[in-house]
Amino acid sequence: MIELNSLFIMNDNSWMNHFLKNSKFILRNIILLSVLFFLSCARESPEGLYTGEIKDWIHEVFEGKLVSSYEESSIKLILRQSPKGMIADMHFSHPKMNEIIRNGTWEVGDGERVIRFDDGKSPSQYYLIKRGVRYAFQSKEGLSNEDGSPILLMRNEGLSRKASYPLGLTFLDRGVARVEGAGANDILSGEWREVGGGVVVVAKLEPSKSANEKEEFLETYKYFLKWANEESQDLLLEKIVLMRPFLKDDGSKRQSWMSSLVFSDLPRLKPTGQ
């Protein structure tokens, strides 16, 4: 009987020790979560000037193959950003033909790049669409290899070039924001707000003094940012969205065209203390 009671006492003590250990673990987690919640709530809103730089392609080279009649033709597509505009060059080489070179322009569309050639040849418009690490090269009429597979191009990293552009975002009282740099010639005015633990800045181009432009017809830039981490006051730029309205012949608004610049290596903006 004494041995049985001793066993019960030992089991009770073991259960009590297990309970106390678990209670300490639970209490510690509750305290930790409370501290993290307090820190997230206590984070100050962005204030003043944040500066950094973004990198964008100014010269891209894409290469691939077109297979037809059991023969391979090479395609080289070169896209440039220059003071003269957005320039596109396409080189097409067939083993039994002289190289064909077409010169045109390009622009960023909704999730794709649109390449246009005004040389009287068909197709006159192509699309470069990202497919993982490759890019599908398409046309309105349809473009594929002999077996029906899509034509895929790869960016030649060695021949392509990036450039750095300074960017400054100023956060003022009452949600007022200013944007400077990143290819813009003037300082843009707009607004900022905190959304979902991050920050969104919306700015519009200033209307031209020589043109009677309505505000709703101006280009709009949206900057999506997030905090670098819990301890840092740095902001990371996730993407820039550009919205530009199309106008009818009578000057009324038809629809908005949108393009996005998404960063794989997020630019870091640091507070300057100014």
Image (cartoon, rainbow, N blue to C red):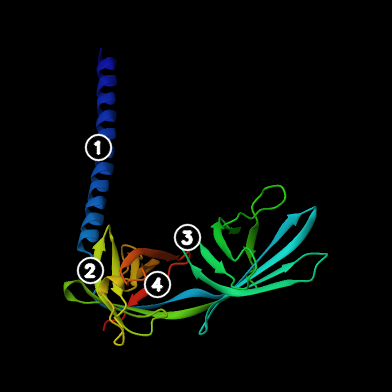
Q: Is mark 2 on a helix, strand or loop?
A: loop
What residue type is disc 2 on? Ser
Tell me how far mark 3 sits from mark 2, CA to CA.
Answer: 32 Å
Mark found first going from the N terminus, 3 or 2:
2
Which residue matches tag 1?
20
Label 2, on which residue? 45
Three-letter code for the amino acid on which mark 3 is drawn: Gly
Asked if one can make out residue 160 in the rendered structure from this viewpoint, the answer is no
Check if mark 3's residue and mark 2's residue have beta carbons within 8 Å.
Answer: no
- Please tell me whether mark 3 sits on a helix, a strand or a loop: loop
Q: Earlier in the sequence, mark 2 or mark 4?
A: 2
Residue at 73% x, 64% y: name it. 74
Q: Earlier in the sequence, mark 2 or mark 1?
A: 1
Label 1 element class = helix
Instruction: Check disc 1 and give the amino acid type.
Output: Leu
Q: How crowded is mark 2: few (under 14 residues within 10 Å), some or many (20 or more)?
A: few
